[in-house]
Image: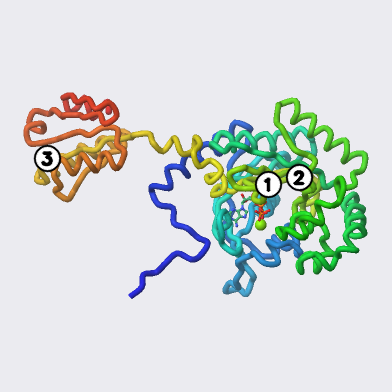
Amino acid sequence: MTSPQALRGTSDLLPGDLARWDAVERTTRAMARRYGYQEIRTPVIEDAALFLRSVGETTNIVQKEMFSFQDRGERTIVLRPEGTAAVVRAYLEHNLHKTQGFAKLFYLGPMFRAERPQAGRFRQFHQFGVEAIGSSSPWLDAEVIALGVEMLKCCGASDLTLLLSSMGCRSDQAASAKQLRTRLAPHRAKLCKDCQSRFDKNIFRVLDCKNPACHQLAWDIKGSPFILCADCRRHFDDVRRALRAVGIAFDDTAVFARGLDYYTRTVFEIRARALGAKDAVAAGGRYDHLIEELGGPPLGAIGFAAGIERLLMAAADGAAAGEAAQRTGVYVAVADPALLGRVFPIVQRLRGRGVAASLDYEGRSLKAQLREADRLRCRSVAILGEQELTDRTVTVKDLEQGSQRTLALDQFVETA
Ligand code: ATP
Ligand code: MG
């Protein structure tokens, strides 16, 4: 009989992998809090309409990548493909616009996209993201971008490039789309099928297309395809000035856009050399109309999301890997399984004090238990035999320093 296997594009994270995940999750949470962002958790399933209304009908995510199904009430449910729309929905549903107005939120969790699985591209993947809702200040753009860059660096990613652009406001976008259509019209036949079919509805998609031919055509356009009004130009200048003031380097010369419908003004991507030229570790931008489009008041907002799997690839030898090596906790080695009745309560006392403690129930030899302690990366081994239990002492081997000493048992339990 064949054994069941995980679905393509999904992965099991085994204890050996999770040390790095845990380090990244702790670092991203700590960074977000340092910048004043609070955690929010939204459900993994949402009404499909949420993403149609926000991400947009002509986008890859909605057209091809959503896992959807009919529930018992015949509604179309999707496994969330991204975080922004869900966070804005929750912000409005819980009246945060009335009770606090400005909100800085972050999330960490799984997202789902029905993509062709390949390196750095999965069907279930994880994102850390932030959303700052209720302000149009360019300083906020700089804050969010700085948080993105610093967070990635802190997790051990290096050789990062920040691509920065402004897609302008809605009326700028209408003018830019018209101009881009005119410029690309002679080359329409050279575009991929998707870009051709979205030519009239979502021409910016060409700028975000993975197809090299489409990409090349977009690159051949001289200068930015975006026409900015005076306000948007000022906003973009202010963002760049704020980033320069805090020493965050960026490249604002690339022709680049974000394919989702909700973006306005500032958009950015952070790439890592380790991932190659085409895949970003993190991406985001402003979405100044989304709150209104989902039924709320007109409020400016900006956010980004970083893919944790790609971040771990970009940080392969970095700090995130380093933390896993630390030894913690005690392995309580039992000389004879007949003593378990007396040792088990001692282990529970240690755990009760918050000390990680492990022990063997299988009657393995002391040597095997020491090997196990090393494999589990325990900091020390406490050896308990008949003699020790009678004398209320314990022999403690420090696995980090290789030293050994005998202590009073109660003192050890109280201070370990
Ligand atoms: P791409 O252009 O690589 O398809 P995207 O524009 O679809 O990315 P976003 O929706 O902006 O990506 O998501 C932000 C980040 O989430 C990406 O930069 C990436 O790190 C991660 N990400 C997106 N899709 C996947 C996926 N299928 N597998 C793993 N990570 C992903
Ligand atoms: Mg994608």
Can you tell which quarter of the image residue 400 is in? top left
Residue 355 image-quadrant placement: top left
Q: Residue under label 2, please give it.
A: 267
Instruction: Give the quadrant of the N terminus.
Output: bottom left
- What secondary structure is marked by label 1? strand
- Along the polypeptide, which appears first: circle 3 or circle 1? 1
**Relative depth, front residue between 19 and 393:** 19
Q: CA distance from mark 1 to mark 2?
A: 8 Å
Left or right: residue 158 versus residue 250 is left
Residue 73, percent across and down? 60, 73
Q: Position of residue 286 (x, y in %)?
A: 76, 45
Rate crowding at label 3 as few (under 14), some (14 to 19) or many (20 or more) other CA atoms within 10 Å: some
Q: Is mark 1 within 8 Å of ligand 1?
A: yes
Instruction: Give left or right: position of 406 versus 91.
Output: left
Disc 3 versus disc 1: nearer the observer: 1
Q: Is residue 326 above or below residue 128?
A: above
Q: Is residue 309 left or right of residue 272?
A: left
Which residue is under mark 1? 283
Q: Residue under circle 3?
A: 335
State how the image is colored. rainbow
Question: What amino acid does circle 2 point to?
Answer: Val
Q: Residues within 10 Å of mark 1 (few under 14, many from 20)?
A: many
CB within 8 Å, label 1 to label 2: yes
- In the rendered image, which quarter contains the C terminus? top left
Image: 326 above or below 18:
above
Q: Which mark is residue 192?
A: none
Q: Is residue 112 visible?
A: yes
User: Height in image: 244 above or below 335?
Assistant: above
Instruction: Tell me the amino acid under the disc marked 1.
Output: Ala
